[in-house]
Image (spheres, coloured by chain):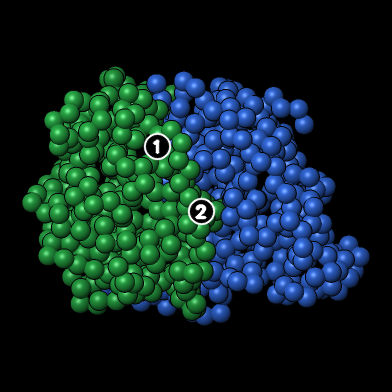
Chain colours: A green, B blue
Amino acid sequence: MPELRKDPIAGRWVIISIERGKRPTDFKMRVPVKKGGFCAFCNGNEYTTPPEIIAFRIDGSKPNTPGWTLRVVSNKFPVLHIDRQINEVFDGIFSKMDGIGAHEVIIESPDHNLTLSTMPAKSVEDTLLAYYQRLSDLKKNPQLKYVLIFKNEGEAAGASLEHTHSQLIALPIVPKLVEEEVINARRYYEHKKHCIFCDIIQQETVNKIRIISENEHYISLAPFAPSSPFETWILPKNHQSSFAPDGNFSLLAQILQLTLKQIDKVLNLPPYNMMLHISPFKDELNNYYHWHIEIKPKLTKIAGFEWGSGFYINPTPPEESAKFMREVLI
Amino acid sequence: MPELRKDPIAGRWVIISIERGKRPTDFKMRVPVKKGGFCAFCNGNEYTTPPEIIAFRIDGSKPNTPGWTLRVVSNKFPVLHIDRQINEVFDGIFSKMDGIGAHEVIIESPDHNLTLSTMPAKSVEDTLLAYYQRLSDLKKNPQLKYVLIFKNEGEAAGASLEHTHSQLIALPIVPKLVEEEVINARRYYEHKKHCIFCDIIQQETVNKIRIISENEHYISLAPFAPSSPFETWILPKNHQSSFAPDGNFSLLAQILQLTLKQIDKVLNLPPYNMMLHISPFKDELNNYYHWHIEIKPKLTKIAGFEWGSGFYINPTPPEESAKFMREVLI
C-alpha cells in the first residue's frame, strides 16, 4: 500500500511507494563525463566574465586576474537586472513589474575538475562564506525582498556550464514557496509557541530512522515527505532564522561535503539541485522560521500529474534513503 | 528588461524574457522516433493489461478482446489503490494516510502510430467522452475528492509507454495546486461577483494578442503568466465549473486537436504535458471556478531556482507564442 504523506512546512502531499521502494541501483545513473573545452570560469579566463563582485585571493593578486580561489560575478545572461526602480503595472486583471533583481554566479573553485564533494574542505567553507557575504550585501538594497541561493549540478539538473558553481537570484518579491513555508511555520508557532523545524529536529532525533548525520552544530536528515527520492536537508540544530553560521562555517562545510559525498557514492554522481532557504529580509530575525539547505538529486521526471496537482510521487521512502546514506562508507 | 508577471489564478509569478524571446527554432527539438517492439496497448494484446473498466467497441466484440476503438484499464503499476478505507494517522508533527485512490489509463486508439494530433477527429472526441464517463463514475465514490486527468506525450515529458494514452489519478484529497486555484477564484468572485476565468476570457478577447483560436463554444489562448514556453489553455467560452461538454464534445475535440497540431508543427513534435483542471467534487457546480485544459510543451528544465522558489523562468513571451501558433498553417 502506498502512503500519502504531508509536509507540514510546505503544506503539500507526496505519494510514497512503501511496499517496494526503489533502491539506488534502480535509478541507473550514468557517471557524467566532463566535456572540457574553453571554460569562462577557469583560472586565466577572468576577462571573459563580467567583473568580480567579490573574490577570495591569498596571493594579493589584482581583481579580474588569475590567482583567486573563489570568485563571484554577475551572470552574463541575467534573468533579472538591478538597474531600475520597481514599477508595478496593472493591466485589467493582470499585474506585472519590471524584472528588478540580481543574478550572480559563485565560482567555487578555479579547478575545472573539482566538485563541491571533491574540493578541499576549505573551498566548501569559502563557498558558504561567500553565500553569507553576498546575502549581507544584497539585503541592504531595499528593493530586494529575498535572495535564493542555489546550485544545479549536472546537465540533467539544469547546469549549463560544467565548472563547479552556485548561483543566486535576488528578487523584488518573496517567492511563493518560501512565503508558504513562512506562513505555515508562523501558524505553527502561533499555535505551539515553538519553531516547527526545531520540533521536527527533536522528534527526528528521538525517532532516529530519518537522521543521516550530525555534528556539534548541524544535522542532516531525510524529510518525512520528500518530493524527490534521496532528498536531504541540512539544518542548524539550534534555532536560527537567517543564514548566519558565525564561527561555524567549517562545521557546516563538513556536514555539507559529507552529505554530497554520501549522495555521490550511493547514487553514482547523480545530477542534483541544492537550495538555501532563509527567512525573508523584512522579518529576518524571528522565532518561527529556521534556515536550511535542501538537496534534491534529480532522479525522477516531473510530468502531467505533478504539473497538474502539485503532488509528487516518490518511489523511495525517506527511511530507506536515510539508511543507504548512513551506511555508505566515505 | 525582463518582466515579472503574476498569474492571478495560480497566484505565482513568472519571469518572462521580453527583450529577446526564444523562437521555436531555438528549442531544437528532435523528432521522436517510435521504438516499436511489443506493446501492451496495441490491438490483440488486451490480455496483458488489467481488465477493461470501459471500452468503446463498434463491432460488438467482447470485453478484453480485439475490436475496440478506445479502452480504459487500471494502471498495472498504480500509484494509489482503491481497495481500502481512508485511514489518517498522526505521528507527532507528521500526518499520513493510506494511498487510497485510483490510477487508470485511457488508451486513446488501438493504432500504435497515431497521436492525439494525428488520429481521426472521432477518436479525439471519444477520448474526451471517456474522460467524462470516468469522471462521472469516480465521483460517486465518497472517498475520492478529486480526479486529475493528464497526458504525458513523449519520453522527456514522462511517458514511459509510447502508445498514445492519457491517465487519471483519483485522490482522497484535493491537490494543493487545484485548491489554490479554487481559493483564488473564489476570493475573486466574492470581491467582483464574476468568475475570474470568464473575466480573463473577456479581457483577452478584447485584447486579442494572446488569443490563438476559437470556435462556437471554446477558446484557446496563451495565458498571461505561463510557467512554460508555448503553454496553451483551452476553455469553454461560457461559464462551466465542472467538465460537462454536453453536446459539444466534437467542438472541444476540434479545438484540442487543432491546438496540438499547431504545437506539433510550430515546435516539431515536442514532448508535452496536458492537464484537465475541474472543480473539486464537493462543490462541483459553482459560479467561481471554470474548467480548462492546460498544455505545457516540455522545452525548459526545472532546476534549483524553480525548486527553491516556485518561480518559473519563461524565455518566450506568450504574445509571441500565441502569434506563432495563430500563424502556422495546418
Displayed quadrant of residue B305: top left
Q: What element carries label 1?
A: strand
Locate residue B189 relative to residue B219 in the image: left or right: left
Task: Indicate which label's residue lies in the foreground, 1 or 2.
Answer: 2
The residue depicted at 63 percent of the width and 56 percent of the height is B159
Q: Nearer the viewer, residue B7 or B116?
A: B116
Residue farthest toward the right in the current orientation of the protein: B59
The residue depicted at 21 percent of the width and 42 percent of the height is A131
Q: What element carries label 2?
A: loop
Where is residue A226 shown, x and y percent of the image? Answer: 38, 63
Disc 1 and disc 2: Cα gap in Å? 19 Å
Q: What kind of residue is marked 1? A: Trp
Where is residue B325 shown, x and y percent of the image? Answer: 66, 30
Residues packed near mark 2 inside 10 Å, few (<14), some (14 to 19) or many (20 plus): some
Q: The C terminus of chain B appears in which quarter of the rendering?
A: top right
The residue beneath circle 2 is: A302
Q: The N terminus of chain B appears in which quarter of the rendering?
A: top left
- The mark found on residue A91 in the picture is none
Q: Which of B220 and B188 is in front in this view?
A: B220
The correct choice, above or below, for B35 with respect to B62 in the image is above
Where is residue A5 shown, x and y percent of the image? Answer: 39, 68
Displayed quadrant of residue B186: top left
The correct choice, above or below, for A57 with respect to A155 in the image is above
Chain to which the residue tagged by mark 2 belongs: A
Q: What kind of residue is marked 2? A: Ile
